[in-house]
Image (cartoon, grey):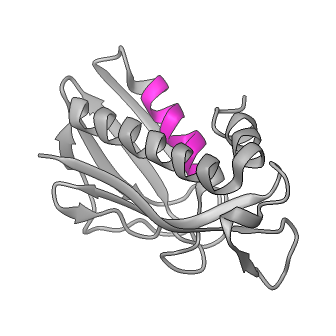
């Protein structure tokens, strides 16, 4: 019962660009722009579906970096608790992260905001809590390093501005 979280194909998109034009991270102009790419969250060998809005390589890393951090912060230190991420994007389902002692159960559920249906084939897929934590931390560290290496000082500023959950 393992978890593997990774990313690839990072690019940035200009906020408000209706064409959704993608640019290399090395040309990131400011920390306010959104970084997108492919995010793979694989639990017990099963990929978490529907992460990208316009396809698998259109996952908002800005959002998911904050959510993964929030998931760790919310579930850590609690042996039984639930966190639901409902992205507020039209057409996206919600994701339920349920910790029961040393296990994490992940389900794709109906969005209460937009009414998008969950995925009956992705219910209570489990891994160990500690494996999930290690995978999230490793992915975030690698993501930070890539963004900072590619975009230099702007990448560092992006991380500081975007990598921590907002209230």
Q: Which residues are magenta?
A: 63-73
Q: Which quarter of the picture shows residue 67? A: top right
Picture residue at 71% right of the left edge, 32% below the top: 166
* Percent x, y of residue 13: 75, 70
Whether residue 54 is in magenta: the answer is no
Rendered view: 53 above or below 89: below
Which image quarter holds the C terminus? Answer: top right
Picture residue at 55% right of the left edge, 67% below the top: 37
Picture residue at 38% right of the left edge, 20% below the top: 76
Q: Give the dominant element type of the magenta stretch: helix, strand or loop.
A: helix
Picture residue at 76% right of the left edge, 37% below the top: 161
Rendered view: 84 above or below 94: above
Whether residue 157 is visible:
yes
Q: Nearer the viewer, residue 84 or 12?
A: 12
Q: Nearer the viewer, residue 74 or 133?
A: 133
* Percent x, y of residue 75: 39, 25
Whether residue 69 is in magenta: the answer is yes
Q: Which quarter of the picture shows residue 21? A: bottom right
Q: Nearer the viewer, residue 7 or 24?
A: 24
Rendered view: 154 above or below 18: above
């Amino acid at each position: 019962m393992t978890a593997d979280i990774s990313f690839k194909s990072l690019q940035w998109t200009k906020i408000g660009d209706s064409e959704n034009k993608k640019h290399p991270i090395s040309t990131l102009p400011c920390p306010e722009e959104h970084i997108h790419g492919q995010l793979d969250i694989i639990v017990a060998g099963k990929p978490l579906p529907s992460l990208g809005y316009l396809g698998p390589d259109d996952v908002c890393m800005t959002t998911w970096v904050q959510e993964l951090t929030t998931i760790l912060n919310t579930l850590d230190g609690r042996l039984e608790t639930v966190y639901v991420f409902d992205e507020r994007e039209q057409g996206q389902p919600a994701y339920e992260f349920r910790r029961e002692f040393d296990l994490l159960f992940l389900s794709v559920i109906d969005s209460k905001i937009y009414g998008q249906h969950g995925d009956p084939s992705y219910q209570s897929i489990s891994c160990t809590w500690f494996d999930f934590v290690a995978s999230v931390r490793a992915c975030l560290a690698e993501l930070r390093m890539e963004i900072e290496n590619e975009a230099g000082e702007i990448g560092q500023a992006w991380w500081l501005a975007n990598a921590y959950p907002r209230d």
